[in-house]
Amino acid sequence: MTKELDSGLRRNDEHSSAALVLTLADIGFDAPAALLARYGLRLLRVADGDAITGSYWGECEAGIVGNDVYARTDTPVHSLLHEAGHLIVLPPERRAAVHTDATDSVAEEDAVCVLQGLLGDALPGVGRQRVWADMDAWGYTFRLGSARAYVERDADAAWAWLRERGLIDEQGTLRFPDLR
């Protein structure tokens, strides 16, 4: 299955480089859970080998249902950040209706691809460069040849989309909601 977007992004089901990407086994669940909590989300650990609830792509890919993000130790960090990004960009009242497939909006999907790199910067030892490299290794393709090239040279509309919704500031830095 392939999903094509205006940015030229496609996610292929061939995972020939799957062993090369950073997984939750590499970084643990604590830092990602704390990051997601800053957005009012919960990271729920799925037992190794069990099916991941709410996973659009299946296998080890992260899943989403309402305010919950599901993952196993073999879930790629970039997948966790991407799926969480779909919930982050939604107003809380719309999150409750999400199960597995967050959107059919090309603009939102493109913005989430930018957001997942920014979220990578908020995780110790990860960073946007690693997230982008892992997206490429996993099988995402962009018309400019890489996730990094897309974000740096072809994602003006996605950056604007994130700014308009208050998710980043004018410099492109993450903004966290006040959940008090």
Image (spheres, rainbow, N blue to C red):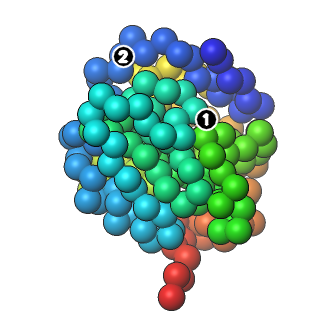
Residue at position x 78%, y 42% in the image: 105
100 relative to 160 in the view: left or right? left
The reply to whether residue 72 is visible in this rendering is yes
Residue at position x 39%, y 63% in the image: 35
Mark positioned earlier in the residue sequence (1 or 2):
2
> Can you identify the residue that label 1 sits on?
150
Residue at position x 23%, y 49% in the image: 28
Question: In the displayed structure, would residue 178 be above or below residue 92?
Answer: below
Among the 4 quarters of the image, the one containing residue 71: top left
In front of the other: 161 or 104 = 104
Q: What residue type is labelled 2?
A: Ser
Which numbered marker is on residue 17?
A: 2
Please tell me how crowded label 1 is: few (under 14), some (14-19), or many (20+) other residues with Cα within 10 Å: many
Total numbered labels placed on residues in the image: 2
Q: Position of residue 123 (x, y in %)?
A: 33, 56
Question: In the displayed structure, would residue 87 be above or below residue 171?
Answer: above
Q: What residue type is labelled 1?
A: Tyr
Question: In the displayed structure, would residue 100 be above or below residue 7?
Answer: below
Looking at the rendered image, the quarter that the N terminus falls into is: top right
Residue at position x 29%, y 59% in the image: 31
